Image (tube, rainbow, N blue to C red):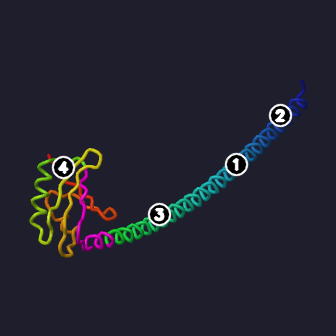
């Protein structure tokens, strides 16, 4: 081969090398640009997701606060209603307690009844002024009853509630139901 051909080939090789280098640099630039754009898009998506998450969190917090307020409001209203109902029951109980009895009154003693408790109750009833023990009777069908005669008006329900063996007193129509404390 001649020197001319060698020089030509060297020039071609140099040009090819230069061209390959330029192409490689161009590809590297394009790859870097593409990676930068992808990174930018990823960052954009992540930022948008973060904003959505923050909005969702804010909304959930607001809903939870609203629900808590409404729950507290409902509880306050229920407490008010309960207090009002309790007041009515208390007034009714006071009214029943203050009600005056006169004449013949039947006391229905709630089962189970213990002989010792009945004896103790009878003794207390004999001590009440303007009240006379008329009859103490008991049957399997009707239970135990005490009939008293009240000479002058007496708040009998209140009086009965103060007697130690008595646990509860409830007005039932004309009669009074008495529950005695359980013996231990």
Q: Nearer the viewer, mark 2 or mark 4?
A: 4
| Image quarter of residue 171 | bottom left
Residue behind mark 4: 182
Q: Nearer the viewer, mark 1 or mark 2?
A: 1
SS for tag 4?
A: loop
Which segment did they paint magenta? 91-110
Q: CA distance from mark 3 to mark 2?
A: 84 Å
- Work out whether 96 lies above or below 28: below
* Number of other residues with Cα within 10 Å of mark 4, as a class: few under 14, some 14 to 19, many 20 or more: few
- Specify whether 163 is left or right of 83: left
| Image quarter of residue 153 | bottom left
Q: Position of residue 33 (x, y in %)?
A: 72, 49
Q: CA distance from mark 1 to mark 4?
A: 84 Å
Q: Position of residue 116 (x, y in %)?
A: 11, 49
Residue 71 is tagged as: 3
First reached walking from the N terminus: tag 3 or tag 1 = 1
Q: CA distance from mark 1 to mark 2?
A: 36 Å
Q: CA distance from mark 3 to mark 4?
A: 41 Å
First reached walking from the N terminus: tag 3 or tag 2 = 2
- Specify whether 136 is left or right of 25: left
Residue behind mark 1: 38
Residue 137 counted in the magenta span: no
Residue at position x 47%, y 67% from top? 69
First reached walking from the N terminus: tag 1 or tag 2 = 2
Residue at position x 42%, y 69% from top? 81
Q: Position of residue 74 (x, y in %)?
A: 46, 66
């Amino acid at each position: 081969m001649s020197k001319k051909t060698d020089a030509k080939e060297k020039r071609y090789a140099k040009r090819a090398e230069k061209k390959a280098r330029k192409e490689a640099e161009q590809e590297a630039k394009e790859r870097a640009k593409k990676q930068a754009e992808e990174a930018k898009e990823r960052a954009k998506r992540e930022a948008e997701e973060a904003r959505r998450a923050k909005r969702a969190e804010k909304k959930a917090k607001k809903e939870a606060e609203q629900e808590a307020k409404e729950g507290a409001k409902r509880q306050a209203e229920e407490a008010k209603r309960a207090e009002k109902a309790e007041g009515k029951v208390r007034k009714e109980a006071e009214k029943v307690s203050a009600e005056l009895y006169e004449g013949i009154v039947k006391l229905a003693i709630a089962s189970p009844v213990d002989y010792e408790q009945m004896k103790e109750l009878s003794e207390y009833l004999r001590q009440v002024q303007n009240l006379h023990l008329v009859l103490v009777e008991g049957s399997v069908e009707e239970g135990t009853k005490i009939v008293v005669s009240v000479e002058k008006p007496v708040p009998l329900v209140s009086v009965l509630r103060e007697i130690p063996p008595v646990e509860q007193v409830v007005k039932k129509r004309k009669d009074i139901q008495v529950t005695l404390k359980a013996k231990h």
